[in-house]
Image: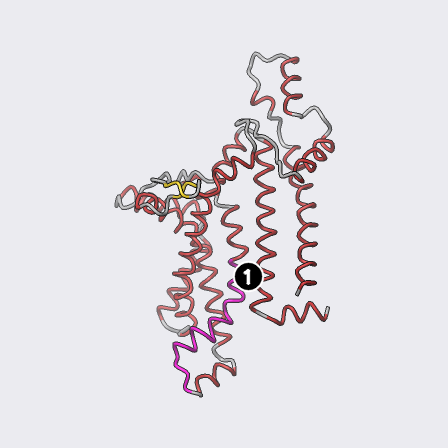
Amino acid sequence: MAEFILRRILQALLVLIVMTVLVFFGVNVIGNPVYIFASSECDQECLARIIADLGLDRPVWEQYLVFMGNLVRGDLGNSFTHGVPTLDLIFERLPATLELAVMALLMALAIGLPLGMRAGLKPDAFSSRLIMGFSMISFSVPVFWIGLIMIVVFAVQLGWMPAVGRGETVMIFGIDISFVTFSGLHHLILPAFTLSLIMMALVIRLTRAGMREVLYSDYIKFARANGVRERRVLSLHVMKNILIPIVTVLGMEFGGIIAFAVVVESIFSWPGVGKMLIDGIAVLDRPLIVAYLIFVVFMFVILNLLVDILYTLLDPRVRLGAASA
């Protein structure tokens, strides 16, 4: 077990190093932020001074070495536009994005698991065909289109839900939280449901496939033959086995939701890190863009590592395979 975790940690460090190279050099070859910050009256001397202040007068490889040295100390630089550490900006906006992602994950599980189990238990029923059709639509329709339809129907025509904003927030342990207030929860429902649809479709399909595979296993037949109640068979024996692929996929999808909530946050004006990224791209705020991308890469690597460890706890065959290798 320890050898398995150590090997995964070393692989994670290698991925982080490679991604810092790709992200830093990829962002720094795009555009020139100096012309955005400089006024129209700024002459060559003024431009040179701005370039030196931003540290852009050095070669790119030297900028990268400085960046890596600061990264080791936990410093991802200061934002060009805000003039404050980029990590402070990310952590200031992160609670809003985490609220959105966690609520989307809970919605996907609360709706997707029962629907997937229903579709797996009775695959030929009309309701099961409707469920699978719903999952196919959720996969196929673009998220921005769903978000716009949600706003038009539930906010504009029916007036049930607010279209933009985060609602009222409460400070808890120094963090602004909105889901504990009625206004905040009211604002959270539409963007969270929009964001959850792709995950919901994945949960439905994975649950259905797992049900169809596990229901015909020998241990399920023996459990039923021994008189174990059907509810216990489904809740204990079946669910324990189908959760392995679901945990794996949702672990990666959760990181994807945080990383790619940009569209939903832009549509609903949700003040999260995704909307902050869009604002940073508009003004070529390189430190902010790089910091966000590095943060996302780090989050993906950590989530992947945690999923691997959790996988070994759910399925001992993973540990045995690693030991034999």
Q: Quadrant of residue 164?
A: top left
Q: Residue at x 52, y 30 (%)?
A: 282
> Where is residue 68 drawn, in percent x and y?
69, 38
Q: Which residues are magenta?
A: 227-250
Q: Quadrant of residue 321?
A: bottom right
Relative to 296, does residue 129 appear above or below in the rendering?
below
> Where is residue 25 drawn, in percent x and y?
68, 36
Q: Residue at x 43, y 47 (%)?
A: 99
Q: Residue at x 57, y 54 (%)?
A: 303
How many discs mark residues in the rendered view? Answer: 1
Residue bearing mark 1: 248
In what quadrant of the picture does the N terminus appear? bottom right
> Where is residue 103 drawn, in percent x and y?
41, 52
Nearer the observer, 226 or 122: 226
- Callout 1 crowding tier (Cα within 10 Å): few <14, some 14–19, many ≥20: some
Q: Main secondary structure of the magenta part?
A: helix
